[in-house]
Image: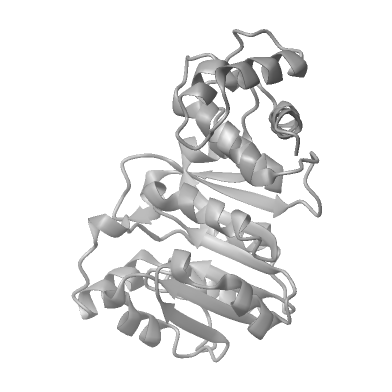
Amino acid sequence: MSDKTPYLGNPQKTIEVIQKYEFAFQKKFGQNFLIDTHVLDKIISAAEITKDDLVVEIGPGIGTMTQYLACAAREVVAIEIDKMLIPILQDTLSAYDNVTIINEDVLKVDLNKLAEEKNGGRSVKVVANLPYYITTPIIMGLFENHVPLHSITIMVQKEVADRMRMGPGTKDYGALSLAVQYYAEPYLVANVPQNCFMPRPKIGSAVIKLTVHEKPPVTVRDEKLMFKLIRASFNQRRKTLANGLNNSPELHYSKDQIAEAIEKLGTSPSIRGEALTLEEFARLSDILLELEGK
């Protein structure tokens, strides 16, 4: 066994590290560390990490998955918000010379610049074990800032993974489903039971891989406007699409413009936002621009 062999997937080793540093789990950071080597192997193989890759890991924790990533990738940049974990990471990752640790909130890190400096602007692979409350802002931040991404392989709450894959008319379909499907192809890698973590989360988790589209599946003139329409439609579920759009503080269209746009879309005036497909939201966005004479 070389000194670079990952060892933190072993629960006993994880306990030793936590005790050594008297680490206290922070509820505000939603910390649940993986203690199952099978799941770790699955994540690495699903992410298809090779020696050509720069991997950005969000939320490395004590470095469990980071050890696996460091063995598989050319270089790993691990971004951790909790400063209490930095000395632990410096210890658990000391055997690897291809890991950089950044103590920062990932939403404040310029990942475009990072990809430019460390990967010549080529696409990076993101791997993360994310707490559920921050999943959507992080994923949307990565997509909307057009970070050069090949894929995002993430551990999330099971219901979030379900939401990412759903189509119109299902209860889990929402703004996140549309955003993910606009930017990427979602694939469920594995469901992960609670006993694979320390401490145990209250709910089941899942690993999902989002492979970024080379070009989006729909063409839209103003993607920001399309997402405003999507958000407005799902902010008030069980309301008609027209009501949702009229009530949105992000939109400035008159009732007449909205009614005309929905009519031009060819749907019923009483249709609900959650019944629209991604393609219909794209068309609605283009119609509204035309009505404004843009």
Q: Is 108 above or below relative to 181? A: below
Front residue of 98/108: it is 108
Which residue occupies the extreme front position in the image?
A: 293
Position of 62 with respect to 227 (left or right) is: left
**Residue at the spot x=63%, y=45% of the render?**
224
**Residue at the spot x=36%, y=39% of the render?**
203
Give the percent coordinates (x, y) of residue 252. Answer: 54, 33
Q: Is 163 above or below relative to 66? A: above
Residue 164 appears in the figure: no
Residue 207 appears in the figure: yes
**Residue at the spot x=58%, y=21% of the render?**
273
Position of 73 with respect to 245 (left or right) is: right
Give the percent coordinates (x, y) of residue 141. Answer: 54, 56
Quadrant of the rendered image containing residue 97: bottom right
Q: Is 215 above or below relative to 149? A: above
Front residue of 106/285: it is 285
> Where, quadrant-wise, is the C terminus in this rendering?
top right
Quadrant of the rendered image containing residue 227: top right
For the image, the number of numbered tags is: 0
**Residue at the spot x=18%, y=75% of the render?**
22
**Colouring:** one colour
Front residue of 180/153: it is 180
Give the percent coordinates (x, y) of residue 269. Answer: 64, 8
Position of 161 with respect to 182 (left or right) is: left
